[in-house]
Image (tube, rainbow, N blue to C red):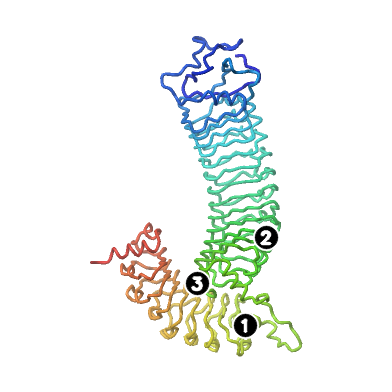
Amino acid sequence: MSWVPGWRGVWWSPSPGYWDGGGLASPPLPGWRAAAGDPRAGFRRAAEPGPAVPQGLIRAARKSGQLNLSGRGLTEGECLLRVQNLSFGAADRWWEQTDLTKLILASNKLQCLSEDVKLLPALTVLDVHDNQLTSLPSALGQLENLQKLDVSHNKLKSIPEEVMQLSHLRSLLLQHNELSCLPDGFGQLVHLEELDVSNNHLTDIPTSFALLINLVRLNLACNQLKNLPADISAMRSLRQLDCTKNYLETVPSKLATMASLEQLYLRKNKLRSLPEFPSCKLLKELHAGENQIEILNAENLKHLNSLSVLELRDNKIKSVPDEITLLQKLERLDLANNDISRLPYTLGNLPQLKFLALEGNPLRTIRRDLLQKGTQELLKYLRSKIQGMLLYCSPPVTAMTLPSESRINMHAITTLKLLEYSEKQAAVVPEEMFDAVRSHPVTTVNFSKNQLSEIPPRIAELKDSLCDVNLGFNKISSVSLELCLLRKLTHLDLRNNFLTSLPEEMEALTGLQVINLSFNRFKAFPGVLYRILALETILLSNNQVGSVDPLQLKRMDRLGTLDLQNNDLLQVPPELGNCESLRTLLLEGNPFRTPRAAVLARGTAAVLEYLRSRIPA
């Protein structure tokens, strides 16, 4: 077969025949020989015509070197890649033809590619995404000029080793296939800048990935990865790493040394903590929502000077460190649906912050209506609390300073009305803490995360002003009568203790709005709570409660949130559906059979409607 100078092309035939029409049936050029038989047989339409390809498209491709046959319903059952020295019409000038460099066959119905693809050595772009390919020809490895290969959205189960020979490849798109492993030779693709293997079935990635030193974007999302190799940190050019929706429990510490990293996506994994980022000076976006992160440390934040987006929603974070103010370029902060009870007022000092999401947290020091006014109003409120001073600053130690007073945060007591003695692992609260209050009216007490076995009796001295008490994460086994004297109390946090009951005297707390009793040892719903009609939120998850009284709950017309997750409820009384004030009812993790999980997943309104439908007529 002789060739027209300057033209090599892959031509697509929707049937064993080829396109007829203008120019295609003209006499062949000198030197062209057809197969035995009719010399025009290769260009005749078959009995069952396939999709037509406009001749203008063919003529344009001869000149541009680019052929786009996407979305034409082409099926590999009848279609073959053939290299043809097509004849030209009288108006065509063979000396103006060029090599085919870009071939797009996307969004068709192809099931395989012909090995004849090797006859297109000038190709730089091959796009066959959105087909039905189950394999790739090994001949792809001979396309030595190929720079972009898109085989995404197919049914590939493996990638031939020959693809690793494409030394000039810069973009390789393999997402949305059925790959369970990748070739070990990936490190040979030294010029690769973009690699997308998301939405496959990968359980690990080759260690040779570390050799991809020019890679800029790596997408590993939606696979089954349980860990990342530490050598991934050798990708010195990587700017974007997406590991969303895998099974990662940890992140290699070396990841924090990737100096070029700008975007890191770790959402929907099983992470319990974040790594420190000492070298990620350029990191602009960190997405780690929907994990199991409990602690956000200062070490996680202090090096992220360029961070503009921090997304940590749907975790178990309990507190936000004051070092959050080091993120001076932060524009978006998403902390929704965590266990945060108090915000550092210094958050108001972030100059670039435009979006702050806090819904779904048991916040006590910030009114609900303030949260609903938007980010700027909330930041304005936080700044007003700082009053131009740093939070938690202590007075200077002078000759007139008592030895104990130097360790007491007098600014918090006098200005913020906060008595703070948390995370000390202490068995008792020092008397000097209460002595320091003197005549200053304190509204908030935080004695959480200690080893307290009882509520400090002197807390009763604060009864005239105290509104908010946090005694969570201690070893308290009973509620003292002193606590019941705090008539102005609105928020009470007793989570993660050893409580089994509440005293009837708590009925005197008529202004109590929020109570958190999660992770205790209650076997029955505390009866006294039914009589505190101001309650808006009751958090009683992770106990052993076996039943609730729906008739008494209905009397609590301010109750909007009731969390009974992970208890021992054998049945949910249908009358609970009449508690029309409930906006959030959480029942997952109980042994009852109805409502079924599908009903619970539809939300509170659907659950209440279901329960009402079960009330006997």
Residue depicted at x 53% and y 17%:
24
Few, some or many residues within 10 Å of mark 3 (<14, 14–19, 20+): few
Mark 3 element type = helix
Three-letter code, disc 1: Ile
Q: Position of residue 293 (x, y in %)?
A: 56, 62
Rendered position, 84 above or below 319: above
> Mark 2 highlights which residue?
304
Q: Position of residue 413 (x, y in %)?
A: 62, 83
Rendered position, 478 above or below 152: below
The residue most toward the left is: 617
In front of the other: 473 or 73: 73
> Within the image, what quadrant is residue 273 found in?
bottom right
The CA span between labels 2 and 1 is: 32 Å
Mark 2 element type = loop
Q: Position of residue 494 (x, y in %)?
A: 50, 76
In front of the other: 216 or 99: 99
The CA span between labels 3 and 1 is: 25 Å
Q: Which mark is residue 369?
A: 3
Q: Nearer the viewer, mark 3 or mark 2?
A: 3
Rendered position, 595 above or below 364: above
Q: Quadrant of the N terminus?
A: top right
Few, some or many residues within 10 Å of mark 1 (<14, 14–19, 20+): many
Q: Nearer the viewer, mark 3 or mark 1?
A: 3
Q: Position of residue 302 (x, y in %)?
A: 68, 64
Few, some or many residues within 10 Å of mark 2 (<14, 14–19, 20+): many
Rendered position, 194 above or below 98: below
In front of the other: 286 or 349: 349
Q: Of label 2 and label 1, which has the lower sequence position?
A: 2
Q: Which mark is residue 413?
A: 1
